Image: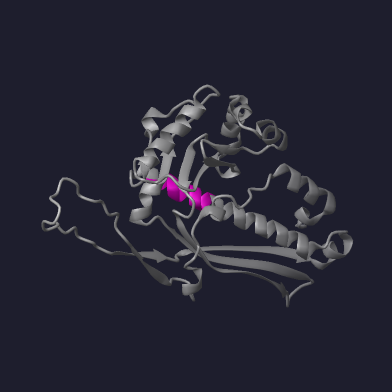
């Protein structure tokens, strides 16, 4: 059967029909441990420090009660493998007016971005379901978002994080439907660049929080707010190659990605989830 996706007309229609999910979530994860990993299955051990608090009400000059300072070690395991292979027949490459290897490679990149964003989304959702991160409600009390209440729900998330002493460099991830509610709410008209933001089709800042739309949340209007870098993710091996077949006139374009993710316990307080519809 012919590989119809690389026919020029079909390929173009497929690109338009299947909207790309850009690397949105992954861009806000912490990937600084990538260089410490060498092969699949490796583990990087990360030390996290506790939060300290002053004790008030003491007597000046008297003995100060000591607080325990326990450094916790946690492991980030690279245990996820994703593979992809596309067959390019010589006859189709000759008949096509596209640079097929380049164009198909672009589709590989889009598939990787979708894979990573959905992986981060699913990890955060699982943490919310397990009550290991901050939530403003639960699945049973899902809030129905509209243009009159979406700002209030965002404020609830911001307050929930602030109560965990997380106030800086916050990012809110929303579906396009939720983003539309924000634009309809008139809230963006109250900022200096509100009209420009609406014209350009992106959200911008709301209450000091950067709001980003992502297709990874298209299936729901759930809201995810977190401090930039609160989630650690490592893409340890990311490569593709073209292999000439030995039994026919075709080539295989192959790719393999090895990756892992972790929300360390101290960072869990810097991630907030709202169940919404």
In the rendered image, which quarter contains the N terminus?
bottom right
Q: Residue at x 71, y 68 (%)?
A: 252
Q: Percent from the top left, x then y, of residue 115?
A: 57, 54
Q: Is residue 166 left or right of residue 113?
A: left
Q: Residue at x 82, y 54 (%)?
A: 7
Q: Is residue 201 left or right of residue 72?
A: right
Q: Residue at x 44, y 71 (%)?
A: 41
Q: Nearer the viewer, residue 277 or 193?
A: 193
Q: Percent from the top left, x then y, of residue 62?
A: 11, 56
Q: Nearer the viewer, residue 148 or 1?
A: 148
Q: Residue at x 49, y 37 (%)?
A: 223
Q: Is residue 96 left or right of residue 267?
A: right
Q: How many marks?
A: 0
Relative to 121, is 158 above or below? above
Instruction: Confirm whether the magenta stretch covers residue 122.
Output: yes
* The residue stretch that appears in magenta: 118-127
Q: Percent from the top left, x then y, of residue 89?
A: 79, 65
Prevailing secondary structure class for the magenta stretch in the rendered image: helix
Q: State the image quarter where residue 272 is shown.
A: top left
Q: How is the image coloured?
A: one colour
Q: State the image quarter where residue 51 is shown.
A: bottom left
Q: Nearer the viewer, residue 267 or 221?
A: 267
Instruction: Confirm whether the magenta stretch covers residue 154.
Output: no
């Amino acid at each position: 059967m012919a590989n119809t996706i690389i026919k020029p007309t079909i390929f173009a229609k497929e690109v338009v029909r299947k909207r790309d999910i850009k690397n949105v979530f992954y861009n806000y994860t912490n990937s600084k441990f990538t260089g410490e990993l060498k092969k699949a299955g490796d583990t990087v051990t990360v030390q996290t420090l506790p939060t300290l608090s002053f004790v008030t009400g003491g007597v000046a000059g008297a003995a100060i009660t000591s607080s325990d300072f326990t450094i916790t070690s946690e492991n980030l395991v690279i245990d996820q493998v994703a593979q992809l292979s596309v067959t390019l027949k010589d006859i189709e490459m000759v008949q096509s007016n596209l640079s097929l290897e380049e164009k198909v490679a672009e589709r590989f990149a889009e598939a990787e971005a979708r894979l990573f964003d959905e992986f981060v989304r699913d990890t955060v959702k699982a943490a919310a379901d397990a009550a290991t991160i901050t939530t403003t409600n639960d699945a049973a009390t899902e809030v129905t978002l509209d243009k009159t209440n979406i700002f209030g729900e965002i404020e609830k998330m911001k307050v929930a994080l602030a109560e965990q002493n997380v106030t800086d460099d916050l990012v809110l991830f929303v579906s396009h439907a939720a983003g539309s509610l924000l634009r309809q709410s008139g809230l963006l008209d109250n900022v200096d660049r509100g009209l420009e933001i609406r014209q350009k089709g992106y959200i911008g800042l709301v209450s000091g929080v950067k709001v980003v739309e992502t297709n990874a949340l298209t299936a729901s209007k759930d809201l995810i707010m977190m401090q930039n870098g609160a989630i650690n993710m490592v893409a340890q091996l990311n490569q593709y190659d073209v292999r000439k077949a030995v039994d026919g006139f075709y080539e295989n374009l192959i790719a393999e990605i090895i990756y892992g993710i972790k929300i360390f316990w101290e960072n869990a307080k810097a991630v907030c989830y709202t169940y919404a519809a």
